[in-house]
Image (cartoon, grey):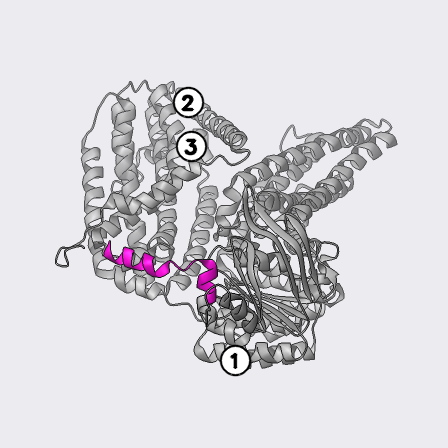
Amino acid sequence: MISLRKLTKRYGSFTAVDQIDLEVPRGELFGFLGPNGAGKTTTLRMIAGILKPSGGSISIAGVDLAADPIGAKMRLGFIPDRPFIYEKLTGAEFLRFVAGLYDQEGAEVEHRARELMALFDLEEWRDELVESYSHGMRQKLIISSAFVHRPEVMVVDEPMVGLDPKATKILKDLFREYTRRGHTIMMSTHTLEVAETLCDRVAIIAKGKILACGTMPELRASAAGTGGAEGLEQIFLRLTGDNAARQLVEVLDA
Amino acid sequence: MPDAGARPDPSLELLLLPKWLTARSRAMSNEHGRGGRFTILGGIGLLFWGFIFTVLYKLLVYFRNVPDLGPFLAGKLLGLILIGFFSILLLSNIITALSSFFLAQDLDLLVAAPVDWLTLYSAKLLETAVASTWMVVLMAVPMFAAFGVAYHGGLVFPLLVVAAFVPFLVVPAVIGSAITLILVNVFPARRTRDILSVIAVLVAGGIVLLFRIVRPERLARPEGFRSLVEFVTILRTPTSPFLPSEWVQRAVLGWLNNRPDYLPLYLLWSTAAAAFVVGALLHRALYMDGFSKAQESAQRWARNHATHRIGYRVLAPLGILRRELMLKELRLFFRDTTQWSQLILLAVLVIVYVFNIKYLPLRGEGITFFLRNVIPFFNVLLAGFVLASIAARFIFPSVSLEGRTLWLLKSSPMPVRDLLWAKFWVGTLPLLILALGIIGVTNVLLQVSDFMFAVSVMTIAMMTLALCGMALGFGTLYPQFETENAAQIPTSFGGLLYMIASVALIAVVIVLEARPVYSYLSAQFYGTPTSRGEMVLGFGLAAAVCVAATLVPIGIAQRRLEAVER
């Protein structure tokens, strides 16, 4: 469903994403982990068609993004990490507008929009301008907008940031059910517990390169060879540098 | 570890440091094409200064040679300019203070930090004053220079001007900030911003109308007054003895007329100091309540089902995507008070424009057939300038304003072309109606011939399309994605380039049409035959230029926007 071939992004002499190869098949919830500045958001924004790759190719549901961007984007939904939306539209208008971008309208869209807003407790706010929404409410509205046009593939950047526990639970259930129905989700997150319990497979990226990729047992098995790590946190720290504890002592004693 | 008992006291310099560092890094950045930009901006700035200086200098030299009345006229002129400055400063300080004291992004950090109230007030007041006065200061330089040179002010004169002008700038900054402080305590900040934008526009419109009613040009024609005594009385009346503008005028003219008067300087400095103290005390009493209130949003519902249905029905033939794009543009515009309130100012400008045409003495002695038909031709030229400035205000910023939501548009399967054309038509149609309205009404007032009516209507229609296409093109080529305030976007470098390009386009079209129009009018007046080839060539070329100026910039904008990475 999502296929990355030698995907590269360079900013001048700095390489943010370095020749990534990745296959995310249909019906999989794929987790993308990495420290800040590792290249996660850049990769996801390239898949969403916002950033242009410096090299390599991206294919979404079999459609090459560079050759047929409109065709590829028709199959894609994107949830960004920062909830910037039109302040002067109401929640309902925003969902209608996003559906319109995907050439969808009518009773079915209205029904979906109403259901999604109800799911995220936004029903009372549907006719209120977005400028009066809180950060979390905006995030919920953006998540709703990504589902309103029923994409085959979903690219999600840090979905849980700013969400209350109830919304987090709903979102996890929604993601699970969505992939169970044969759709694909690629998600970046810093919450290792979410990645561990929710994702079918996980990739760990640092300095623009994928360091490890596989199911949790596969990651554990590969980590066992280098010292026997148990959880994703240990694997993550081992791969991305585990000198945090030593640094903490130095910082607090300074 | 810091001593828990000691009171931290971040200094004023520390609070201003981020602003200074930002300005410095902006000035030092070696972004591509900066040198060229600076050269163009500097050149235009110098031309502007030179123009103001020359006009004022010539006027002042003329006044100097008018016996008895000369000094009064110079004084009146300076008084008028200064009172204009004072009104502008007051208004712009009120608006700027809302951002700097209540909505700026650094406020959470500063208010949460252990910063003394007086330090915070001083820092924010200085920030407000600098942001709202720099333009007035730039205008004042050639103005005072003209006075100094025309009246031989000497080397000390610039120092005297600085001594008088600095407190003159402080007073409206303090008063403006205090007015905003009180307003924010009454309304939430977002509602205050709405109210302020309407007030600001109404005041600006009022000033323009008042200016037309007062007709300052009459002062240059004393014969229009019933008696010389009445004229002199008007000249001698001070604008208002309690206004700082009057004190600056007295200080400056006293010096220039070799009768130095230091009382106005004392008045200026003592008033500025007293205003600062009162402003600071007000700040201490009201700021925290106001700042807390500024965090509240104005609850606003939009349940306009009737307009929603009408919009859907009217735009239905465009298809789902284009209809939704256009509806979005319309909603964003009419729900943003800072945007639609500009329409009031626009209406005032149009009224003033039409009235000026109405009062043109076209029926008087010596007004020939040519003049009656040529003036409507220049009417198109002037209307073109008005339309260019409106397009700069409304269409130029439209792509920049998408900056924060570009992720949505770029990740959706929407062709960029559709977005640009939606923006083009939403901006252009009202302008087209306005343009045809202005030209139609003024043509009727001028009683022009059918030929000139047709030419001017066709020209303005084509020109409007071109000006709007260029506004969209330049706005996309020089975007200001980070600017949240739409009003600041047209004042950018790209906005300036757009205005220069617009003037060039209007000039080219007028020049291309001048020949066939002249030849037609000659044929009418003298009975000579008209050249069909000349007509087709002139009007055809003008039309081709307009079509190209509409389509080419939008095409370039499309490629640019497709390449934008955000």
The residue tagged 1 is: A170
The residue tagged 3 is: B219
Report whether mark 3 lies on the same chain as mark 2: yes
Q: Is tag 3's residue or tag 2's residue first in the polypeptide sequence?
A: 2
Q: Is residue B137 left or right of residue B472?
A: left
**Nearer mark to the viewer, of 1 and 3:** 1
What count of labels does the image hold? 3
Residue range highlighted in magenta: A235-254
Res. B408 visible in picture: yes
Image quadrant in which you'd find residue B114: bottom left
**Nearer mark to the viewer, of 3 and 2:** 2
Instruction: Please determine whether, in this image, residue A2 is positioned above or below residue B234.
Output: below
Q: Do callouts 2 and 1 mark residues in contact (Cβ within 8 Å)?
A: no
What whole-number distance in Å separates the C-alpha atoms at marks 3 and 2?
18 Å
Question: What percent of the width, then of the height, locates residue B195?
Answer: 42, 60
Q: Nearer the viewer, residue B460 or B21?
A: B21
Residue A239 inside the magenta-drawn segment: yes
The residue tagged 2 is: B57
Q: Is residue B141 left or right of residue A25?
A: left
Instruction: Please determine whether, in this image, residue A3 is positioned above or below residue B50.
Output: below
Q: Amino acid at mark 2?
A: Tyr
Q: Do callouts 3 and 2 mark residues in contact (Cβ within 8 Å)?
A: no
Residue B197 inside the magenta-drawn segment: no
Tell me the crowding category of disc 2: few under 14, some 14 to 19, or many 20 or more residues within 10 angstroms, Cα based. many
